Amino acid sequence: MGLLSALYGLGVGCKRFLVKPQRLPAKVISVGNITLGGTGKTPAVISIAEEAKKRGFQPCILTRGYKGKVKGPCFIISANHSASPVGAGLCACPGQPQGVAPTKKYICTGLDAGDEPALMAERLEGTPIVKCADRYKGGQFAISNFRFELPNLLFILDDGFQHWRLHRDIDILLIDATNPFGNKRLFPEGRLREPLSSMKRANLIVLTKTDNVNSKTISMLVQEIRKHNSDAPVYRASHKPAALIKSSGESADLNFLRNRKIFAFAGLANPSHFKETLISEGADIINFKTFRDHYSYRQRDADKIRSEAAGSDIITTEKDLVKLRGFQLPNNIFALRIEFSVEEDFYNKIFRREQ
C-alpha cells in the first residue's frame, strides 16, 4: 500500500472511532458500498422506499446530496412540480406559524439537491427526502417538519455505510458483481473507500448486476466475502431496464430501441454497464459518449450532443437527463429507466417490524 492510501485508510479509521453514533426514534436502514460509485445505490434506494410504502411504512430518505448546491437541511422536491409533492405532510418550519407553507430555505429542487436525490424526488412522489450532510440532524429536521406516524416511520440512509454519526439498525452493503473491488486497494490507488475487512459490519449483502456475470464469478465473489463476513445473507440482484422516459416525463416502450440506430451518452462511474444494457435491448449504438460521474452539464454540452447525434435518437440515463433539465434539448432524447430487482426474501428481512 502506498503512502497516500495508507494515510487515507488511517483517516477513515480515526474518523470512525472518534464519532459516537446518535439514534433517531425510528428504524434506520442504511444502503451503501465500500467502493467509489457504480454499484447502483440509487435504484436500490428507490426500490426499498417503494416496497416500504407497499408494506404500510412511511419511508423518509436521508441523503447527503453529493455535489448539491444547498447544504441543508431541506426537503427535496422534483423540479417537475410547481408545488411540493409532499406538501400535504409538511408542517410549519421553525419560526413560521402553523399552516404556513415552508419557505424556500427549507425546500430545494433539481441540482440544488444533487443529481441522485433529484432523481429520487422525481421517482418517489409523496416520499419525503431530506438533504443534510449530518444525517442525524436531517432525521430530526424531518420529524420536526413532517407529519409522521412514528410507529410506521422508516428512515432510509442513502450512501450510509461510512456515515458514522447516525446509528443504523440494518446496514445493507451493495457490491457490483461485474467489478466488485477494483484492484483491492484503497483510494487514491484504487476504488476502495475502506479495507475489505469492513464488510464484517454488513447485516445484508447484495451483489448487483449479477445478470451480467456467470455463476462461477458469483461463487468466487461469495467466497471472498465469506473471508470477511461469515454471517450476513448474500442476495443476488439485477438492474433491469423498464422503460424509456422523455424529458417531458412521458414514457415509451423498450421495443423502441430494437434495431434502431442511436447516439448514447452517460456520466456514470461505470458507463460500460449502461452501454451493454442498451445493446442487450437491441440498440444499434453508432456512438457512445462518456462524461465523468456527477458531471455538471451546460448548454454547450447539450448542443454538442445534438450535433454529434446528427439526427439519430439520443439515449442517456435518468440521472443524466435530470441534470439536463432547463436546457434546450432535442425532442428525440430519452432516458433509460432502470429498476432494481432482488429476491423477495431481501425485503422480508429488512422490513420485519420486530427489528
Image: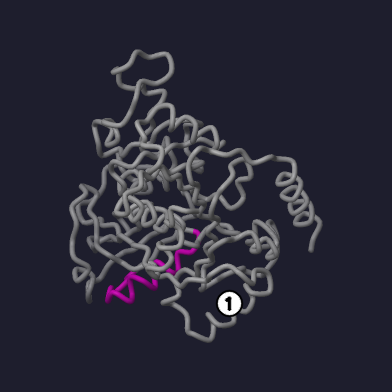
Quarter-of-image position of residue 272: bottom left
The residue sitting at 58% across, 57% down in the picture is 36
Question: Residue 212: image x %, image y %?
Answer: 43, 77
Image quadrant in which the N terminus is located: bottom right
* Relative horizontal placement of residue 186, taking residue 155 as reference (left or right): right
Q: Is residue 39 above or below residue 248?
A: below
Question: Residue 51: image x %, image y %?
Answer: 34, 56
Instruction: Please tell me how crowded label 1 is: few (under 14), some (14-19), or many (20+) other residues with Cα within 10 Å.
Output: some
The residue sitting at 42% across, 13% down in the picture is 95
* Relative horizontal placement of residue 312, taking residue 352 as reference (left or right): left
Q: Find the residue positioned furthest to the right.
A: 3
Secondary structure beneath dot 1 equals: helix
* Relative horizontal placement of residue 126, taking residue 29 as reference (left or right): left
Amino acid residing under circle 1: Val
Q: Is residue 335 above or below residue 296?
A: below
- In the picture of the structure, the residue carrying the numbered disc 1 is 222
| Residue range highlighted in magenta | 269-286
